[in-house]
Structures are given as structure tokens and as C-alpha cells.
Image (tube, rainbow, N blue to C red):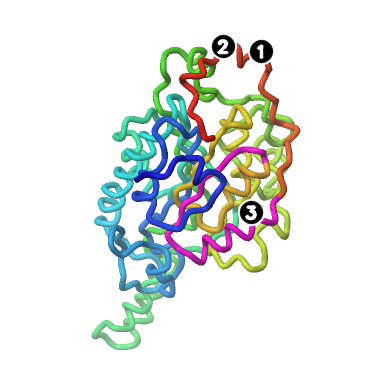
Amino acid sequence: MKETNSKILNNIICGDALIEMQAIEENSIDVVLTDPPYFLDKMDDSWDYKTVLNKKNHYTVKSLPAGMKFDREQGKRFYEWYSKVSVEVFRLLKPGGFFFSFSSPRLYHRMASAVDDAGFEIRDCFIWLYTQNQAKAMSLNHFIDKLAVDEADKENLKQKLDGWKTPQLKSCFEPIVMAQKPTDGTYLQNILAQEVGLLNTNIKIGQEMFPSNVVSINEINEEIDKVFLVSKPTKDEKAEYNTHQTVKPLRLCEYLIKLSTFSKDSVVLDPFVGSGTTAVAAKGLERKYIGIDLNPEYVEIAQKRLGETSDRQSPQIKSKPAQLGLFISPAKKPSFA
């Protein structure tokens, strides 16, 4: 017997996303905002795939050299798996609901294709711009040292290839797919019936600029900061006890939620919630949330962070006009009570 949304609303669930999402009512979620596993060696040769992926359903390269190992099959397996995730997300989103999914530059095309093929409309691509990251290009010196030639030839070859490394540059952005479930009728009809489907351009970025699909949380230079900067993360927002390796900035998640959710009844789902940043952002903005993660350690961290988060109404979010409710058919609104 499936759980009703009322039992899982404003909770973090420990389990496999593909299984747990089946308990969520169809056409009941306003926004899905998530950062799924990318099936890549994103860190180094000490990255432990067992703590990130479900061995039963997910795959990655298990024998990793230092740096990133390129494998075309990773993208294919990721597409197959994320296609299943996207189909389930499509089912549970309301008409006009939004799907924001972080990715890596190398696998964005696979993610976007999986989302597109599930029935979504790809509306935009957000770019999270930053300057600090680990360079992944590798020198070939260690291969040269193994050549069956004398030391002078080895040194000569090293000098000729000085600075020439494997084709993996320092990555300074993350793409975020913005997809939308097709609306039921016109945008006006959809927002009246479902309270989702439009973007709130009252939300500003940088120095009170029109919202942009490029976002930065770090001061870079005056011109970029003017048009792309959101509030910098506070020193304590991650929390000292948070062991997650890739915590997303709270302000970035807040920005996407504020753009896409219309009312306090909006429900934000993160099926790969990690240490809970999406849920923390939703709660802080007085939105409802559902989080899912396979790792019990992360679930515990997310629950602790949520316990330390108080509801607050963001001054940039406009309250729903009272008269709009007169046009909404109660029969079309999902019930969480």
C-alpha cells in the first residue's frame, strides 16, 4: 500500500529514489531540484563510489587512477538510468511543473537528452559560474618514465611535451537543465489551475538586475558581479558536521526555488537530497519539501540541518494574490491533508 503525500511531506526519506518516488502522488509536485550522481570520478583516486551510488542500480568505473578516467560507457549508463528517473519525475510533477537538474559539462548532453526523451520541454540551461576547482588534466611524464629508452631520450621527450596534458581542462561551471512538464492549456490557464508554470521575474540578481540563467556565488569582477551574483554563502550554512563532499550553495538553491514556486503550498522535491540543501532552502522560504537519499549518513545530516532551519518569508517572494484563488478549481488541486 502506497503512502500518501501527507505522510512524507516535509520529511527526508532514506531509500532508492526510483522506488521511493513511486509513493508520491502523480501531478502533485511543483518543482524538482536535484543534484544526481554523475557517474564520474569527480574527485580523485580516493573517491569511494560505494558511499555515493547504489551498487544494484548504478554503475561507475570502480578502478580509478589518479584524476579522471574517461569511459564512453559511463555516459550511456547514466542516460539509461536517468531516463528512468526522468520518467518518474514527469509523472509526479504537476502540469507546468519545473525540473532543475545539476550536471557536469561532459555529461550534460546525456542528462538533457534523458529529460527531453521523458516528455519534458527543455526550457533553458542555467550556468553556475565559479573560479575555484581542481585541475584534472594529467601530465604524461609517468608514462614516459616507463618507455624502454635511455634517460636522455626520456628527458628530451618530457621537454618537448612540457605543458601538454590530457584533454581535461579546469572546469569552472556547472550546467543546470531547466525543463518543464507541458502545461495544461495556456500558461494563464495552467497557473490558475495548478499554481505553477511561470517564472517570477520580480526576483532580482546581482545589483537588482533581471533574473539570469548565469549565476555566481563568488565575487569575480565588477561587471560579472553586477549581473550574475547572488548572495554569498554564509560561513556556517554547510555546518561543521556536514561530511558531504559536494554541498550545493544554499543561495543558489533559493534562487531557483524563488524563481519557480508560486505559493506557500508549493512542494519542492529533491530525490537525491544529499545533506539537504534543497530542503533547507525550501523550508527557509516557507515552501513544503520532500527529500530522498540512499545514504543514511546524509539523511541524518539533512534532518539535523533542517532542525536548525527556521521558516522565514523571503522579501523577494510576492505573496499569492487573494483573488487568484477564486479562479482555481478545487478539484484540480492535490490534497496533502
Q: Residue at x 29, y 61 (%)?
A: 59
Residue 197, x across and y down, in percent? 50, 24
Check disc 1: other Cα within 10 Å, few if <14, some if 14-19, many if 20+: few
Q: Quadrant of the N terminus?
A: top left
Q: Which residues are magenta?
A: 285-309
**Quick one: SS at disc 1?**
helix
The reply to whether discs 2 and 3 touch (Cβ–Cβ < 8 Å) is no
Marker disc for residue 327: 2
| Image mark for residue 306 | 3
Q: Position of residue 331 (x, y in %)?
A: 47, 19
Q: Residues within 10 Å of mark 2 (few under 14, many from 20)?
A: few
- The Cα–Cα distance between marks 2 and 1, rounded to whole angstroms, is 8 Å
Task: Provide the residue designation for mark 1.
Answer: 323
> Amino acid type of disc 1?
Gln
Please state if 274 lies on the left or on the right of 308 as rendered.
Answer: left
Gap in Å between the C-alphas at discs 2 and 3? 34 Å
Task: Please state the horizontal and vertical placement of residue 315, each as a whole percent of the image.
Answer: 75, 33
Cα distance between the residues tagged 3 and 1? 33 Å
**Regarding mark 3 in the picture, which secondary structure is present there?**
helix
Kindly check if marks 2 and 1 are in contact, taking CB atoms under 8 A apart as contact: yes
Amino acid, disc 2: Phe
Q: Based on the picture, tell me whether residue 296 belongs to the magenta stretch.
A: yes
